[in-house]
Image (cartoon, coloured by chain):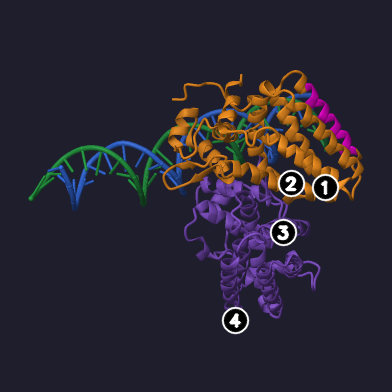
Chain colours: A purple, B orange, C blue, D green
Amino acid sequence: MNENNEFLYPQKWLSKSSTGDRVASELRMQIISGKIESGATLTENKLAADFGVSRSPIREALKILAAENLIRLERMGAVVIGLTEKDVEEIYDVRLLIESFVFERLIKIDTKNLVTELSKILEMMKIAIKYMDADEFSLQDVLFHETIIRTIDHSYIKMIWDNTKPVMEAFILLSMRTRINEKYEDFERILENHELYIEAIKTKNRELMIKSLHQNFDDVQGKVDDLWISQQTLSKGVEKNE
Amino acid sequence: MNENNEFLYPQKWLSKSSTGDRVASELRMQIISGKIESGATLTENKLAADFGVSRSPIREALKILAAENLIRLERMGAVVIGLTEKDVEEIYDVRLLIESFVFERLIKIDTKNLVTELSKILEMMKIAIKYMDADEFSLQDVLFHETIIRTIDHSYIKMIWDNTKPVMEAFILLSMRTRINEKYEDFERILENHELYIEAIKTKNRELMIKSLHQNFDDVQGKVDDLWISQQTLSKGVEKNE
DNA sequence: TCAAGTATACTTGTATACAAGTATTATAAT
DNA sequence: ATTATAATACTTGTATACAAGTATACTTGA
């Protein structure tokens, strides 16, 4: 039934994952992009037929998406919740919360290796922009923050990250795909913010860190120019995929 | 193979849940209590035979426990990680983090209904103690905090709660089962702290809230008297079950 | 005795089968 | 025409079957 053979989620990022993970990644992109509309009902049999797999991995995928609050498992089918403006704000609440927590820990330890690692990632981001590779840029952006969080070796903070990461990654991916064509200049600012962030970690400057973190959120959310990247805008990222 | 027919997790709390959830709840208790030791390898077939169910719900359970970082899914079997002292501290980091966040929101809204609800729960806790019902007490204790968190209607904060709650619930359950016999007087202090917490919410007193929250953690963790409720101590809770 | 290679008995991941329950639709009676 | 009832088609939850891969143990050779 799925007449569109192209996938929204970069297939090369799925090297080692199971069928269930792949389906979850793809469904997540379709839900967040709006290709699958909020309120729609997904049934296991239909999805299994669409993806050409059995119900086992589909069930796995639905469990994952339910944990991410993108769908709601009901007696008859899974109802799509989707990602609202409120959700995105809430995700950033959580990110601000955990990255602030992490920063307090970073202040107490040696961050030399971390700064080196982050500088490397930042350079990768620059290359990605140079070649207009929104996907690679998004990957590195997410990795940037993950690297910071992993440094403090806190399994429950990491758990929170693991739970929010997939949705955030998908959102950033769609957002960047749109903007790399329409608002290329945005990326300059994003890079500056990341440089600021590294500087904050290097100098253990709390205010600077909070400032860059907030600016980064505003950037990703597009608050600088628009209030909110609408579902319609996000869905543009769908077409750019190849 | 499981010669012990008794369950650690209260069966009446599982009214509506699926087999997978039941298995997860029971395995969680066995892991946290130390009945299943850290480092042990669990295989799906063995667990299926032990619980007398098929592999499907077992797989479901293992996925849940892996998300809670209690086990690590590997190519051949699931390796039990267990709950270390560090983990418990980290859980409380997260609780402190989210409950502080929640409190900031509570300050801005009308908390009259919440205070009423919390008072009710507190009275339930008192009754539970009166009848030496550690399980009911634990249930209400967890519900107390969940009620506070749900008030602000923040789906991602709630997500964090949903992810940490099961482990915390199991830990509190085992801790309370032990202490209701050995340290009955502890419960007086726990009640006082909860009263303080309600007072803090009522008067929107941030310092009081932080104070009671910290004291509550110390109480549950047993830091007032012991540094840490050892695995050995926790396992006593195993025997008290009936 | 030891080493190399092979057979065997597990392991998970996915597909399929079955069972119990729910919504819908069709049918029949008033 | 409408309402009650019954048949049907579809849903999830669980059990089982199969396939691909891995570790263990054994056999065979020196």
- In whole angstroms, how far apart are the C-alphas of marks 4 and 1? 45 Å
Residue at 54% of width from left, 64% of height from top? A5
Q: Chain of mark 1?
A: B
Magenta segment: does it hold B108? Answer: no
Magenta segment: does it hold B126? Answer: yes
- In whole angstroms, how far apart are the C-alphas of marks 2 and 1? 10 Å
Which quadrant of the rendered structure holds the N terminus of chain B?
Answer: top left
- Type of residue at label 4? Lys
Q: Which residue is mark 2?
A: B96
Q: Which residue is mark 1?
A: B103
Q: Nearer the viewer, mark 4 or mark 1?
A: 1
Residue at 51% of width from left, 40% of height from top? B59
- Type of residue at label 1? Phe
Q: Nearer the viewer, mark 4 or mark 3?
A: 3
Name above or below for residue B66 compared with residue B54. below
Which of the 4 image quarters holds residue B141?
Answer: top right
Q: Which residue is mark 3?
A: A100
Which quadrant of the rendered structure holds the C terminus of chain B?
Answer: top right
Residue B55 is tagged as none
Q: Chain of mark 3?
A: A
Whether residue B150 is visible: no
- Type of residue at label 3? Ser
